[in-house]
Amino acid sequence: MTRSAKAGRLARWIALVAAAATVVVAFVLGDRFGIDPSQVDSPLIGQPAPVVSMTNIDGSDEIAFEDFDGSVVVVNFFASWCIPCRNEHDDLVAVQSEYVEQGVVVLGIVYQDSLANVDRFLDELGRSYEVVLDPGSRTAIEFGVFGIPETFFIDREGKIAAKIFGEADWESLTAIIDPLLAGEQPDSITTGTVQPGPEG
Amino acid sequence: MLDVEMSSSPATDVTRRSLIRRVVAALITSTLFAVIVIGLATAPPSGEDRVAALAQRLRCPVCQNEAIADSPSETAQQMMEIVREKVALGESDQMIVDYFVARYGQWVLLDPPLSGWFLPLWGLPVIVLVLGLVVIARRRRAAATEDTMESIREARPEEAQRQAELDLDELAAQVETKEISADVAADLSARYSAEKEAAARAGGRSNRVDDRTTRSRARLLTGWTMAVLAIGVVIVMVVQAVEVRGGAAATVAAGRSLEDVTNEEMEAVLAENPDVVEMREALADRYFVESEYEAAIPHYLEVLQQDPQQSSAWARLGWSVYQFGEVDLAIEYVRRSLEVEPGRPESQLYLGSIYLYGHSDPQAALPLLESVAMRQDLPPDIRASVEQAIATARSAIDE
């Protein structure tokens, strides 16, 4: 009788601890494990560029990544409501003009913005490289975009080689393009934060 | 312990009847439980169920710890759309999850991972269940002891009374030697005293004994029902977890890529989901490529109803009706294709061919065919037929 009474109490204690543990775990799970995406490497590095068909902003052309086979492609997601996107625009234009002979193509992809706003943005800051639309953010999802600005680099074989998370500039862009042109593997760079939507 | 002969006395009948009742109750509960659990576990989840379930498991990448089901953002809505499409196409839950994980990383899943630190998490409900069963088993043994005591009491009340007195004496001795603590002793003492009184009153059936028996039986039944329901819940959870993890045999929804899906299956899916335009066009294209023009036509028509901007659908619809001698209609359709997408090579090829062979109009055909011939990327068999057609057109004009 004694032993079973003690065993009964032990069982009750274990049950109590288990119940308490369950409550704690429920709290933790409720918080759902937030992680900072800028600290996580894109799983797309090394994967082929997505197969998508994109329309340019004047509607005159359909563009796919396979069209650029053999070139290095700088894919920049941007929008008119994004301040760092305004800041990096000049450097992207400079990269396009300086590197075009070496087979580098810059491609802008509009992220959650209207054609009218983008037209105004480009009228103000200057047009040079091709810009395409992404209705419904389908292409952004294909690239695993968390927000803007994000810039992806596709190598000559059509594989996603690296990524800049945050505002780009001449230094960070060339730090990736130069190794790619030399046939080396560059590292991805995180320069700051990205904005997930117009409201912030 | 006393040795009791189980002769055919009223006490034995009572025991037997209570046993039968217990068995029947357990059988009924088990059957109900089996029906519910098997029903839940084997019913394939509907498309919407799967979409809803997946949407709860996928994290919105542009939000703060929200599932795509809960977020109004454009990205989340587009991801929902993608999930719906993929479910309609017959992709398995694991394939759909893999699609997003390949782009956003493991982070895009809201589930805690099935590894390392987190395995105990998944095991917790099972542990709690096992403990519950242990508690029930303990109760059962206590109830059984009471039943035995009861039958002893009925059969030999004087023996039972004497046994109770002996137990009380032993208890006193144990308290003396500190083998038992005071509160446990008080508990046991009360029990033995009650036993003694009950035995003293025994001779017929006393209400108190009946009450205790009925109560303990009710407790037992409740315990069993709860255990059985808990087991049912655990089984359902395990089945769902295994299916969701893509376990080999246990998956309810078979996973394949689009290449393995047959035309019949696509027809069936489209019957359920008439608005998945891309899939309908893909099926129509399949029929078209297999030269099954009659099957392709209704699907192209439906596609164009929903999306009149599909230049490919217009062109192929035109070529399909041309096969049935509808030359004018074919020309109209293919022209529409070129209105939507000017200079489209496949459309030009069709229109040129229809003008040449269907309308005997080489003059109209030639510029179209020559435009097609200028493209660098024609497959050799197409190039051959284009050049053949141009030659035919030119000689027809020269005549």
Image (tube, helix red, strand yellow):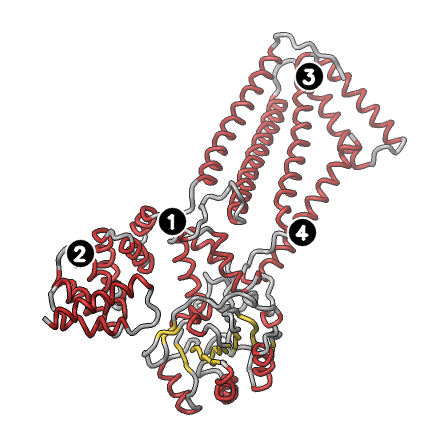
Which numbered dot is residue B153? 3
Give me the chain letter of mark 3.
B
Three-letter amino acid code at disc 1?
Val
Q: Please identify the residue farthest to the left as the structure is shown.
A: B399
Q: Are marks 1 and 2 in contact (CB under 8 Å)?
A: no
- Residue under circle 2? B323
Q: CA distance from mark 3 to mark 2?
A: 97 Å
Three-letter amino acid code at disc 3?
Arg
Disc 4 with disc 2 on a shared chain:
no
Q: Nearer the viewer, mark 1 or mark 3?
A: 1
Mark 3 or mark 2, earlier in chain: 3
Which numbered dot is residue B261? 1
Image location (x, y in percent) of residue A171? 60, 85
Residue at disc 2, secondary structure:
loop
- Residue under circle 4? A20
Q: Nearer the viewer, mark 3 or mark 2?
A: 2
Disc 1 with disc 3 on a shared chain:
yes
Q: CA distance from mark 1 to mark 4?
A: 49 Å
A87, above or below B135, in the image? below
Q: Are marks 4 and 2 in contact (CB under 8 Å)?
A: no
Kindly identify the residue that appears in the image at 54 percent across and 22 percent down.
B21
Q: Nearer the viewer, mark 4 or mark 3?
A: 4
Residue A50 in sight in this render? yes
Give me the chain letter of mark 4.
A
- Circle 4 packing at 10 Å, graded few (<14), some (14-19), many (20+), is few
Q: Nearer the viewer, mark 1 or mark 4?
A: 1
The residue nearer to you, when weighing A84 against B370, is B370
Quadrant in the picture for residue A188: bottom right
Q: Please identify the residue farthest to the top as the structure is shown.
A: B7
Q: CA distance from mark 4 to mark 2?
A: 74 Å
